Image (cartoon, rainbow, N blue to C red):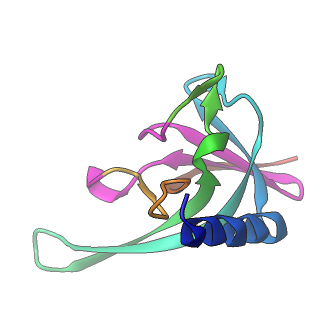
Amino acid sequence: MTPFAAAIQSAFGAVQQSAGVSIVYTRGSTPLDAPILAVPGQTLFQFNDQDGGVIEYQSRDYIVSVSDLRMSGNLILPQRGDYIAETQGNTTFTYEVSRPEGIDTPWRYCDVARTRVRIHTKLKSQVST
């Protein structure tokens, strides 16, 4: 790893510790090996519809360490249709991994060293207890 990549990784680790939220990532009914710490964000997508209008779509994003994406001991990459659950207070928000209109992949690498991914999601449900 280059000194620059190491500095980026260290800086992101600090952001993750100070601004991260605990999430549960599942594929089908199988969760990752452990809850992970993710940095929440958002992305605004814009595209034209058939009539020439502009459609805007805002996703809830999660930036996570690739090394945290372990299922049954194996590293995985996000897939469309996976789910992320985040609890805020007494409410659990469930998001589906996706991008609008099925365009492109629902995630992207955040750094040259490919140690972090930004996962795009859309809200599917929220349940308060």
Q: Quadrant of residue 62?
A: bottom right
Farthest-out residue, left: 51
Q: Residue 45, position in %: x, y?
A: 36, 72
Image quarter of the N terminus? bottom right
Magenta residues span 77-104
| Residue drawn where x is 38% and y is 55% of the image | 99
| Residue drawn where x is 58% and y is 40% of the image | 83
Farthest-out residue, bottom: 53
Query: Closer to the camera, 70 or 58?
Result: 70
Q: Quadrant of residue 5?
A: bottom right
Q: Is residue 100 magenta?
A: yes
Q: Residue 88, position in %: x, y?
A: 82, 59
| Residue drawn where x is 62% and y is 22% of the image | 29
Q: Residue 80, position in %: x, y?
A: 41, 41
Q: Residue 13, position in %: x, y?
A: 74, 64
> Is residue 81 found left or right of 103 in the rendered image?
right
Query: Closer to the camera, 37 or 100?
Result: 37
> Is residue 12 found left or right of 14 in the rendered image?
left
> Is residue 104 found left or right of 22 in the rendered image?
left
127 to 69, vertically: above or below: below
> Is residue 15 found left or right of 99 in the rendered image?
right
27 to 17, vertically: above or below: above
